[in-house]
Image (spheres, rainbow, N blue to C red):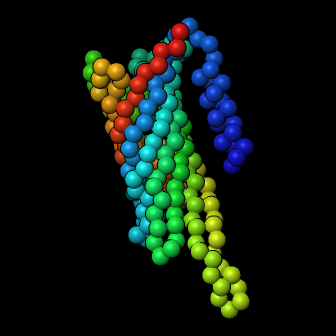
């Protein structure tokens, strides 16, 4: 898993650091809500924070509408029940295709890959001479499908997204996020 993550971030770094005549990069962050990861328990990692970056491919690909790629990191606040602590961290690699655009509003489709890391920490207990508990992590790979919208502000864009994340894996969930993206023009 560490090799896959390193390869993904190295590829994104190379893509974003290449010297183009004009490149549009948006960076941002916001709040995130996800439900459904732990459906059969009351420990559901629901609220968290998200940071992201997007890169527009319009200067390099001739398409009728805007097309961009991006990555985001989602950190869900840990939950605890009966001394069992559960945390969830996600990495999303997505493509965004504009469906509708005018001066202020931009609606887009989302598709991509989700990598979720679920960590469960159970306090160690001894029963009949055997010790149980400890920390265990599991990584899940799945798909992202959804839609989003941006509303133009003076300094950036206010965004909202609804997507199904982790489809095909055990950590699938409905994810709602909102925040602000700020464009960074690279010349």
Image coords of residue 86 (percent x, y):
51, 63
Q: Is residue 9 above or below residue 139?
A: above
Q: Looking at the image, which residue is at 41% across and 16% down?
A: 64
Q: Nearer the viewer, residue 161 or 98?
A: 161
- Tell me the quarter of the picture where residue 98 sits: top left
Q: Is residue 49 above or below residue 21?
A: below
Q: Nearer the viewer, residue 141 or 21?
A: 21
Q: How many marks?
A: 0
Q: Looking at the image, which residue is at 39% across and 39% down?
A: 30
Q: Is residue 124 above or below residue 85?
A: below
Q: Is residue 85 left or right of residue 105?
A: right
Q: Is residue 123 above or below residue 182?
A: below
Image coords of residue 180 (percent x, y):
37, 32
User: Residue pushed farthest bottom?
Assistant: 128
Q: Is residue 174 visible?
A: no
Image coords of residue 96 (percent x, y):
45, 30
Q: Looking at the image, which residue is at 68% across and 92% down?
A: 128
Image coords of residue 58 (percent x, y):
48, 16
Q: Looking at the image, which residue is at 44% across and 59% down?
A: 45
Q: Is residue 131 left or right of residue 71?
A: right
Q: Is residue 9 left or right of residue 85?
A: right
Q: Is residue 18 visible?
A: yes
């Amino acid at each position: 898993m560490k090799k896959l993550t390193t390869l993904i971030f190295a590829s994104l770094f190379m893509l974003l650091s290449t010297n183009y005549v004009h490149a549009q990069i948006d960076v941002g962050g916001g709040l995130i809500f996800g439900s459904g990861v732990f459906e059969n328990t009351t420990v559901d990692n629901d609220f968290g924070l998200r940071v992201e970056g997007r890169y527009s491919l319009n200067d390099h690909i001739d398409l009728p509408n805007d097309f961009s790629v991006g990555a985001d990191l989602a950190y869900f606040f840990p939950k605890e029940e009966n001394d069992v602590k559960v945390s969830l961290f996600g990495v999303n690699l997505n493509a965004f295709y504009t469906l509708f655009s005018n001066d202020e509003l931009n609606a887009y489709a989302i598709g991509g890959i989700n990598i979720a890391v679920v960590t469960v920490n159970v306090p160690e207990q001894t029963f009949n001479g055997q010790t149980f508990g400890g920390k265990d992590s599991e990584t899940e790979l799945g798909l992202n499908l959804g839609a989003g919208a941006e509303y133009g502000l003076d300094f950036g864009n206010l965004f909202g997204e609804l997507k199904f994340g982790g489809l095909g894996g055990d950590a699938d969930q409905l994810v709602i996020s909102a925040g602000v993206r700020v464009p960074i023009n690279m010349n």
